[in-house]
Image (tube, rainbow, N blue to C red):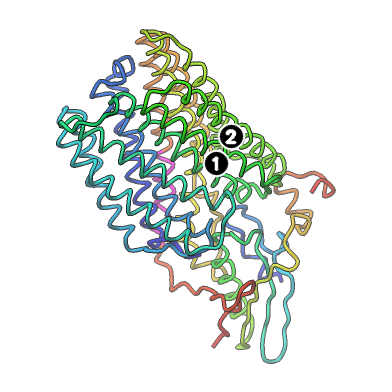
Amino acid sequence: MPLVGGARLPLAFIGFGLMALVMACVWLAITPSLGLTPHLHPHVVALAHLWLPGFLLSVCFGATYQLTPVVLGAPLAWERVTWLHLGLHVAGLPLLAAGFLTGRMQLVATGGGLVAAGVLTFAANVWATFARSERRDAIGWSLPLACWWLALTVLGGLLLAAMKLGLSVAVSPLGLLRAHAHAGLAGFFLTLVQGVAFQLVPMFTLGEVRRRWRIAAGLAGTQTGLVALTCGLALDWSGVVWAGSAMIASGLVFSGIELVATLSARRKRTLEPGLKAFVAGAAVVGMGAMVGLILLWAEPGVEALRGTMSYGVVVVGGALALMVMGMLCKIVPFLVWMRAYGPRVGRQPVPPAHTLGHPVWERVWLGLHVCGVVSLAVGVLMDSAAGVRVGAWLLAGGVFFFVMNAVRIVAHLRAKPPTALRLVKPTSAGTAVSNAAG
Amino acid sequence: MAELGTILDPEFGLSIVELGLIYDVQLSDAQVKAVMTLTSPYCPAGDVIMGGVQSVLERIGGGRAVTVQRTWEPQWTPAMMTRAACAELGWKEMDEV
């Protein structure tokens, strides 16, 4: 499967995402009081958008554009449109964050509109590719489903912005905000991970999926639960919210069991730091789901607010960031290797992809990141400024090593330009015969 | 085979010969034909690895026509790896694989 945009497009999205991550971490390290500020404060909302659509979503865009053809076994439907998406996202995200930071909702609507337009092109691209492919198992379905939730997330966000600007809708803004957050966090990121992880983990560990029905059951549980959860949150139906959360938790149990089984069947015994981070993030997802259920019973008040913010730190910084950054430790070297060294295979010695990065830096990042998230979450929960400050600096330190490692990997692109790549063209289903040598 | 052994799987850093991906290489007066597989039908580096095999065979083929055929029969399993490759991946006993 050829590289989408010659690998430049996925790497550009990933690079943009890492810039947003650096900005978010530096901002929090310089202003740790943000960690103790209520989550509806404009600055906290701006920080959350640097982390979520800024970092995690940008990275997922890049990775998904490259993975979609691999997972679905069909070329991306509209490859050129991906560059338009990159432009919309890069233009819209800074406006969105700046709008929240300054409290200018028109700027939020403009930036959000650009980001949303990009998201819709992304979703349409994945849906069209899915329609052209023949893969219809749970792993294949996870991609269009994740895009569906993402589209709903940005449309919900735009509706919130419009309500702030005066549009009257018979829905509580707070309920819609919660539905927006959960559709993005659980709907997009979780759905994506629940499917694609079972493609990537066996590939990176020489393992195999043990029971495919467990992947389908996990996805079905979370999808059903998400419908109930988002509707319940938007319409303030607490019973439906509880039922939806329970269904999501049950779906995660199936996915978790299958992930453990898949990892147990791996032939590559040693897990690299990236895969360790992914597994740790997945474990935190499970714990986060349990904590989320407990928070449903919490009486409203200051403690519940701190608990919710601490929960957000754990879910975003602990679960999602660890899983996404862990996979980046594998995906970025692979993309760079394919572009820099792929054309030289068989013509000259080339290094393996996993040697492009620095395993020690990856371990240092992982250690600092985990300690930082724990300290930050405890600091927020205990209302401890010192805990938040230490956590923010540890997190920033970890990100420094992560980014340095990424720069080291990407520097391999400066290697001597490769000669024209000669690929084998498939000529019939199941087999492929290359061109005869001249 | 020794020449093909210089091609490494990018993910694991193991020779494609030691991984057991090369099923057959036939040399005749007119052509060189290799039959190979990949660890997974979804292997994203599949085309690059096959392109590498093509390049190696062209280099050593002495002007013969080169054909690289991908097959999924039999499907690759870890049991096809050499003992050295298993050891590289952290296995002490072949039976465990």
- Asked where in the image residue A380 lies, by quadrant, the reply is top left
Subunit of label 1? A
Amino acid bearing label 2: Gly
* Range of magenta residues: A403-415
Residue A32: x and y in percent read 31, 18
Q: Is residue B20 above or below residue A51?
A: below
Q: Residue furthest bottom?
A: B29
Amino acid bearing label 1: Gln
To which residue does mark 1 refer?
A194
Q: Residue furthest right?
A: B95
To which residue does mark 2 refer?
A251
Residue drawn at 67 percent across, 91 percent down: B30
Of residues A240 and A347, the one nearer the viewer is: A240
Q: Say whether residue A325 is visible.
A: no
What is the total number of numbered labels drawn onto the structure image? 2
Q: Is residue A222 above or below residue A45?
A: below
Side of A150 where B27 appears, left or right: right
